[in-house]
Image (cartoon, rainbow, N blue to C red):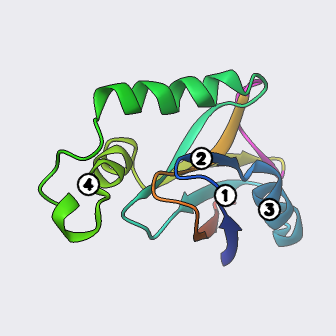
Amino acid sequence: MLSTFNISSSNKTEMIDVTSKIEEIIAKSNIKEGLCNVYVPHATAAVIINENYDPNILLDIQDALSSLIAEGKWRHDSVDNNGAAHIKASILGPSETIPINEGKLLLGQWQNICVADFDGPRERKVIVTLIKTS
């Protein structure tokens, strides 16, 4: 089963929690056991699983990536000035797969699913694929 939804970022770099939207999709699917793949079809965005209870963690991730990957020094910047965004997204990756058990995502106590946008503000598509295993 495939579902899509859009999210909008309002900053150049932003982490957007999409966990509740994905949980709604799973609930409507009636899948009790399976896999959930979350994918963004964008070269300057990524999907991560990390803590969102303390929003400072997501800010720390953004700060760490910014300190490791400087802006404005990449060959691709001559095209559209977003070389660093491409590199950050490549390091984190465009998807995550999470098991579903008893109709619920098997995330850890502090884990949430976030889309990391490194070239906002803009609208991003999120593709959720659910696979029933039993």
> Splitting the image into 4 quarters, where does residue 88 fall?
top left
> Splitting the image into 4 quarters, where does residue 23 fall?
bottom right
Q: Nearer the viewer, residue 35 or 118?
A: 118
SS assignment at label 3: helix
Given the image, on which type of amino acid does mark 4 rest? Gly
Residue assigned mark 1: 10
Disc with the residue nearer the chain's start (4 vs 3): 3
Residue 1 appears in the picture as rendered: no
Magenta span? 103-110
Disc 3 to disc 2, C-alpha distance: 25 Å
- For label 2, the crowd category at 10 Å Cα-Cα, with few meaning under 14, some 14 to 19 and many 20 or more, is many
Whether pointer 2 and pointer 1 mark residues with C-beta atoms closer than 8 Å, the reply is yes
Residue assigned mark 4: 83
Give residue 99's position: percent from left, percent from top. Answer: 64, 46
- For label 4, the crowd category at 10 Å Cα-Cα, with few meaning under 14, some 14 to 19 and many 20 or more, is many
SS assignment at label 1: loop
Q: Is residue 104 magenta?
A: yes
Whether pointer 4 and pointer 1 mark residues with C-beta atoms closer than 8 Å, the reply is no
Q: Which mark is residue 26?
A: 3
Disc 2 to disc 1, C-alpha distance: 8 Å
Whether pointer 3 and pointer 1 mark residues with C-beta atoms closer than 8 Å, the reply is no
Q: Which mark is residue 14?
A: 2
The C terminus appears in which quarter of the rendering?
Answer: bottom right
Given the image, on which type of amino acid does mark 3 rest? Ile
Q: Residue at x 62, y 55 (%)?
A: 35
Given the image, on which type of amino acid does mark 1 rest? Ser
Q: Residue at x 58, y 68 (%)?
A: 122
| 58 is higher (above) or lower (below) than 131 | above
Main SS, magenta region, reads: loop
SS assignment at label 4: helix
